[in-house]
Image (cartoon, rainbow, N blue to C red):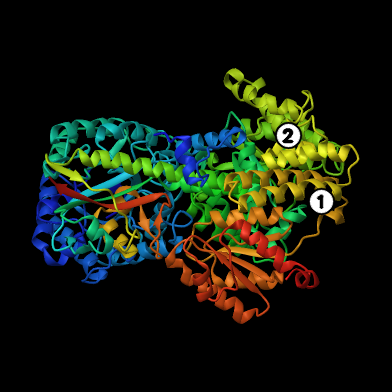
Amino acid sequence: MTVGLREIARYMRMGPTLPEGELAARVSTLRDRALAVARPVCTWRRFPVEDGAITSGGVRLEITGTLADHMAGCGAAFLACGTIGAAFDSFHRRVSVTSSLDGLIVQAVGAAMIEKVMDAMEDDIRRELAPGESLVSRYSPGYGSFPLEAQRPLLALVDAPLKAGVSLTDSLLMVPSKSVSAVIGVRKD
Amino acid sequence: MGKDFLCDGPVILDGAMGTQLQARGLLPGDTPETWNLSRLGDILAVHAAYIDAGARIVYANTFGANPAKYHADPPLEDVVAAGVALAREAAASSPHGAAVALDVGPTGRLLKPAGDFEFDAAYDAFAAQIAVGVKAGADLIAIETMGDLYELKAAVLAAKENSSLPVLATVALGEDGKLLTGANIECVAALLSGLRVDALGLNCGFGPEKMLPFVRRLAGMTSLPIAVKPNAGLPKVVDGRTVFSVDPEEFADGVAALVDAGASIAGGCCGTTPAHIAAVAARLKNAACRASRAERSSCRAASTVTSGSRALEIPFDDTIIIGERINPTGKKRLREALVNDDTAYVLREAVAQTEAGAHVLDVNTGVPGIDEAAILDATVRSVQSVCDLPLQIDTSNPAALERALRHYNGIALVNSVNGKRESMDAVFPLVAKYGGVVVALTLDEDGIPPTAEGRLAVARRILARGAEFGLSPASFVVDVLCMAVSADASSANVILDSLRRVRDELGCRTCLGVSNISFGLPARALLNASFYTMALANGLSAGIVNPLAPDMMQAYRAYRALTGRDLSCNDWIAFAPSAEIKTGAVARPAPAAAAEPSQDALACAIRRGLKADAAAAAREALATGSEPLHVIDRSIVPALETVGAGFEAGRVFLPQLLMSAEAAGAAFDAVRTAMPASGGGATKGTVVLATVKDDIHDIGKNICRALLENYGFRVVDLGRDVPPEKVLAAARRENARLVGLSALMTTTVCNMEATVKLLHEQLPGCKVAVGGAVLTADYAAKIGADFYSRNAMELVRLAERFFRPPAQDAANS
């Protein structure tokens, strides 16, 4: 995996500008170190969508709020979770001790990396589609009016703690911090 | 049943439970353990099929039944007891019989500092499950699929402290051979050997073929029986169903190779079936396990220390550096930091030593009048949150040692035991329980023997007593004690003689606090480095030194290059340029902006964010006669102002602002060293900063700290996930008029509100500023905060207004 300077700059909130000179060198060094500790893991599973919800075993995930509009017409969905791992967080804490700029850069690198991981996972998921099926864009709890509380059923249904090492804190934060969970609707032509 | 049944290999374990239950209708989201009471026949049938296939140990269906994870009906106690009883019933109905393992899986929570789950809470969850399993009559405890070294430690401790049953512990590696939280197989071997499990190994993760190199590495680390439970290859989705790629015969071939490599206990994990286990049992029927302890006498695990992700064997034929900086003896600033809970200072010391090349960090918090047990525990944990080096836990207080060892993630270097009966009686039981490589000080009731012979005699007695606790010489690092040569002219010779003889005659590793040698003499750095080289040449395995002292690092690297330990002199070549600069052999390149007068060059370097140039320009300005205060007022402050104003106007982005802040910081440091001691201490005011309880995202808070410090404020940074009471205590202690709180998530703003409320109730004079991604000015007002800052620069402006003398304030308003 690699991530480009432009993507990192976006997460560094640098507007339209790119890092130059000493800053660019620093971004590139920290990016390489972060890539060396990152450990991407993904897990996903396909479910039918029935009566506005995904139900399996004793768990029910309501497709509500803006997600319901987003997924209109989808008879199935993939639930997915990806992370770049706990060692990245440890590295981030370490660089933040001596420099908040390094902390800012590394967190931007992590944000760019997890996006890459999720994109790659979507490509893998696409290979599992039947002819005539396509994916709608991924949607995460907390976006729009799809509630953050959906994290619990979502992560349970993909067995995220065991399969990806991603779990929830009591305050519904995903840990490791650079983790993304999503519902990805399946649409038929 | 005795503990030996795990040693008489090959021992056949069962295969997957989950795969079998899914075939019988278990769905994603279901809680498999509830089937122990609702689908008894299915569970019995799975166990019976595995026993028929040849399994002699079956795992009860209790993998996920711990209180942290299991929230279903019926109650946990009932499903665990029923799970053990069903396995027992299946074993009893078979003519072959089988032992029943209580299956203990992970809690599904990530432990602190990676997550928010306390180590003690994880321990309690495991202990609850284990207590029920023991009562229900399990024959052994099988801890499996662990992906985090720290959680593994909690589980094993819970098993050992709540039962006398044999413990078999296996972990799940990823494709890269590491646990989810980064530990490698050497960490696992060292931890589990140190905690004295009865057997250890691998399960899940991948098929038998990929397990092979890791089983070889395990066999090279430990002589404990090795267990393997591979998957039936990798899962694939075919027509919407998950299938596994390795068939029973191929699986058995793979397992046979694992047994050849040292495993003696074998079964299957995900995707395996009774047919897989039958094939394994048939293949291993006449296999001789070369895994017996006699044949595999490896004890590398005994001399290995680890962090949560990194293992280090204390070398016998090479040498390592133990960083000595986190020890308050003779260090006023560190003592203040420990007393005032200034974690940030301690962490900076840890990171600086790590970056300088230390291999292990000493952590000593022995300050008179503090609660050493609490402070040592907290310091070890916070250092482990930012640093992946193994630590040396350094205390003479047994209660502090136990608490720190218990909560330590990994296997620590324990400093220290000595030849006094009292010391050995206190320390050895702790090492036997928590594992550890032990520093043995060669002193006893009669003091420090003046001769090498005397020190060896003490070391021999310590080793002999340690053996009674199951500790081999490999688990010791002998400290022959460094005494000042100014007090005793023979001191250095005795030390060097002792080092050599401990290595040659006792076969033990050695360590030494090198810089004591020069105590009481001038030019200590030179003496220290010279003596360090002499000690290295006499076999020193671990020097306790200051890795930030260039002379010591030069001596270390030169020794390794000159004695063939640094192959092709690669480390030396990489290190040489920095050594040459530090010794002044190469002229420093001129600052980029040298053409300008140096004060302007300084402002320019700050505006451009060039740290080295800014420091050099500041030194240059001072060297050419500028007054220190002048440099600050005329160059540093205006340059910072320009950049800050640019940020507020949207012309400069946050990274550039921070680069300038760092450059200004470097210039400040240069100026401060030139100022009389009293001149550098003036601050504009003290601000206490914290990220609120349950919130672990602190990047914004860190940026605020950096900028506030740059603008001349004193910052007491309490870190992240800080409970309200701790914020209150710090604000009270510091007499702080301004507290800054940050929160990232909507779900943690309630803790921010609680903190604001507590501060307002208890400290009416103290104002609270809040910030963070989810906050707005309205929201901040709603939770009772006095101020809201959109970003770090706003907080700086706010603090400037807040701490400005009232008269001036009135004039401006």
Q: B795 or B480, which is in the foreground?
A: B795
Task: Please name the amino acid that badge 2 sits on.
Answer: Pro
Q: In this view, does B657 lie above or below B730?
A: above
Please indicate, yes or no, whether residue B710 appears anywhere in the rendered image. yes
Residue designated by label 2? B550
> Seen from this angle, which residue lies furthest right?
B625
Q: In the image, B152: left or right of B113?
A: left
Earlier residue among tags 1 and 2: 2
Image mark 1: chain: B
Task: Please name the amino acid that badge 1 sits on.
Answer: Asp
The structure residue drawn at horizontal position 18% and vertical position 34%, both measured from the top left corner, is: B252
Residues packed near mark 1 inside 10 Å, few (<14), some (14 to 19) or many (20 plus)? few
Under circle 2, the secondary element is helix
Q: A1 or B194, which is in the foreground?
A: A1
Q: Position of residue A1 (x, y in %)?
A: 39, 34
Q: Position of residue B396 (x, y in %)?
A: 65, 57
Which label lies toward us, 1 or 2? 1
